[in-house]
């Protein structure tokens, strides 16, 4: 899999994409992640990537030419399954979308910045717009890192125990059950007896019941009655 991230602030992405599961996946050759500086595609000596909006108003807008040229260079070299733009008004990102995107081969993620990008890019080049929540951040770099992390950890081989990813919260529209580890008794706070029983069918039944109960209590929007 290949993920190319277009950004005006590449340094913001270097650290989060060079640790833990994502780093291991990159080292194993399971995913190639390229962080591309949009300023490398400007034509003026100041390397400007933003300008004032037509019609006036506060804030600056990402210019069309650097984005168009960067996307054009990449798509001229290979085909892409999705060209994603991170935006507060995009489709809400969730686990199902991460699962879907993890099956793709080549993805471009355009990290929005300033007040936004020239609408013509969204109209003619972007294939999918994604929001990570109903709030506004200083830029799309953190959302791009979140999307990338969620996708990469689903690639077979990225996590040592692949069943771990399949049992994560939201995989079946339910939250994960409570988890415990040693010691079994800490200052009188005890692990539920069922988890110490060794009876795996009963343990799995308990975990499923706990997951449903937690979902009903904490995320009633996800809960569906049987």
Image (tube, grey):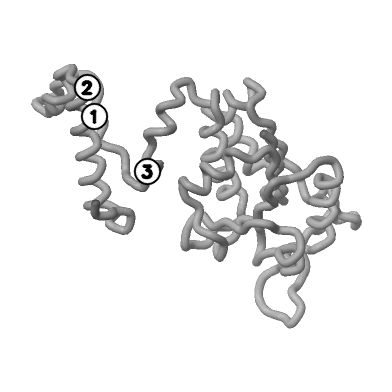
The residue singled out by tag 3 in the image is 172
Please report contact status of discs 2 and 1: CB closer than 8 Å, yes or no: yes
Considering only vertical position in the picture, is 79 above or below 113?
above
Pointer 3 or 1: first along the chain: 3
**Where residue 43 appears, x then y in whole percent?**
90, 56
The local secondary structure at tag 1 comes to helix
- In the drawing, does residue 154 fall left or right of residue 125? left
Label 3: few (<14), some or many (≥20) within 10 Å? few
Where is 133 relative to 81, above or below? below
Give whichever of 185, 104 is nearer the camera.
Answer: 104
Work out which residue is located at the far left of the displayed protein and give it.
188
Q: CA distance from mark 2 to mark 1?
A: 6 Å
| Corner quadrant of residue 45 | bottom right
Disc 2 to disc 3, how far (Cα)?
A: 20 Å
> Residue at coordinates 69% horizontally, 46% vertically from top-left?
81
| Label number found at residue 204 | 1
Q: What is the C-alpha distance between the residues marked 3 and 1?
A: 15 Å
Q: How many marks?
A: 3
- Residue 5 in the image: state x and y as whole percent: 69, 44
User: Which of the 4 image quadrants contains residue 48?
Assistant: bottom right
Q: Is residue 107 above or below residue 48?
A: above
- Tell me the residue that label 2 is attached to: 200
Give residue 35's quadrant in the image. top right
- Residue 170: percent from the left, percent from the top? 38, 44
Is 181 on the left or on the right of 43, as rendered? left
**Which badge, 2 or 3, comes first in the chain's sequence?**
3
For disc 1, the neighbor class at 10 Å (few under 14, some 14 to 19, many from 20) is few
């Amino acid at each position: 899999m290949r993920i190319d991230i277009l950004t005006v602030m590449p340094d913001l992405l270097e650290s989060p994409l060079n640790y833990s599961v994502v780093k291991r996946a990159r080292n194993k050759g399971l995913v190639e992640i390229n962080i591309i500086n949009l300023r490398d595609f400007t034509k003026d000596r100041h390397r400007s990537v933003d300008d004032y909006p037509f019609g006036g108003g506060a804030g600056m807008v990402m210019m069309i030419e650097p984005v168009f040229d960067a996307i054009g260079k990449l798509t001229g070299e290979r085909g892409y399954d999705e060209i994603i733009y991170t935006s507060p008004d995009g489709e809400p990102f969730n686990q199902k979308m991460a699962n879907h995107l993890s099956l793709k081969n080549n993805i471009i993620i355009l990290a929005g910045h300033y007040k936004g990008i020239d609408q013509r890019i969204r109209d003619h080049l972007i294939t999918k717009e994604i929001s990570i929540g109903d709030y506004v951040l200083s830029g799309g770099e953190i959302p791009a890192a979140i999307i990338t992390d969620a996708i990469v950890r689903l690639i077979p081989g990225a996590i040592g125990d692949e069943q771990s990813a399949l049992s994560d919260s939201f995989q079946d529209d339910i939250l994960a059950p409570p988890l415990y580890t040693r010691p079994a008794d800490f200052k009188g706070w005890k692990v539920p007896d069922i988890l110490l029983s060794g009876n795996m069918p009963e343990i799995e039944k308990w975990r499923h019941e706990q997951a449903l109960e937690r979902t009903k209590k904490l995320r009633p929007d996800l809960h569906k009655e049987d």
